[in-house]
Amino acid sequence: MRRAAFLDRDGVINRKPPEGEYITRWEEMQILPGVSEAIALLNHAGFLVIVVTNQRCVAKGLITTAELEILHGGLCEALAAAGASIDAIYYCPHEMRPPCRCRKPQPGMLLDAARTHNIDLAASWMIGDSDIDIEAGRSAGCKTARLLDSDERANGNSDVTAPSLREAIDQILRESSRDGSRAQ
Ligand SMILES: [Mg+2]
Ligand SMILES: [Zn+2]
């Protein structure tokens, strides 16, 4: 079994769009500083890197699944050009209602990925910038890391808090090397 780092997309990998807006064009996809380095560190540490993202812009008719997949292809290519590899991207295209099993805070995308990629969820991490990411990660049995804006305070729900993906990954890799040395 492999361990995975499940990454939320908006606000973790790329700049979060304003509330109520969605990224529907490549021009709007701005990869955040330090992200490719952070993902490359996960790659080298043997983590699968899997993106799990709610995209109800599909249900709203703002983008088709084909267009979203092209956008995601572009994201993977841009990161790969910077030495960072994404193993899979899962998205929930549904509206909030009726409830589905994949929209975070439901853990469906993590559970599906775990089945497909033979992932040890208890040795894996969910990293996100919102409480629903943390809830999804905990429901799946993963450890969790919450990215905080400068004006946000940690609410104690996550195992790790950090201001950026890069700093979260540094903490996670320190913790997992400690776990690894305990296991030996
Ligand atoms: Mg987010
Ligand atoms: Zn869904």
Image (cartoon, rainbow, N blue to C red):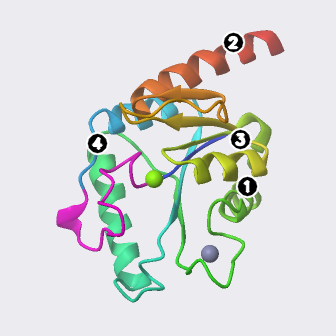
- First in residue order: circle 4 vs circle 1: 4
Residue 100: give x, y in percent of width and height: 69, 77
Q: Secondary structure at mark 1?
A: helix
Dividing the image into four quarters, tell me where ligand 2 lies.
Answer: bottom right
The reply to whether the magenta stretch includes residue 14 is yes
Question: Callout 1, which amino acid?
Answer: Ala
Residue beneath label 2, please? 178
Q: Specify which label sits upstream in the sequence, 1 or 3.
A: 3
In the image, which is nearer the foreground, mark 1 or mark 3? Answer: 1
Q: Amino acid at mark 2?
A: Arg
Label 3 Cα neighbours within 10 Å, binned few <14 / some 14-19 / many ≥20: some
The question of residue 105 being in magenta is answered with no
Name of the residue lying farthest toward the left:
27
Residue 13 place in picture, x, y as percent? 38, 47
Question: Would you say the magenta stretch is mainly helix, strand or loop?
Answer: loop
Chain part drawn in magenta: 9-29
User: Which quadrant of the figure contains the N terminus?
Assistant: top right
Q: Which residue is mark 4?
A: 32
Quick check: 69 above or below 3?
below
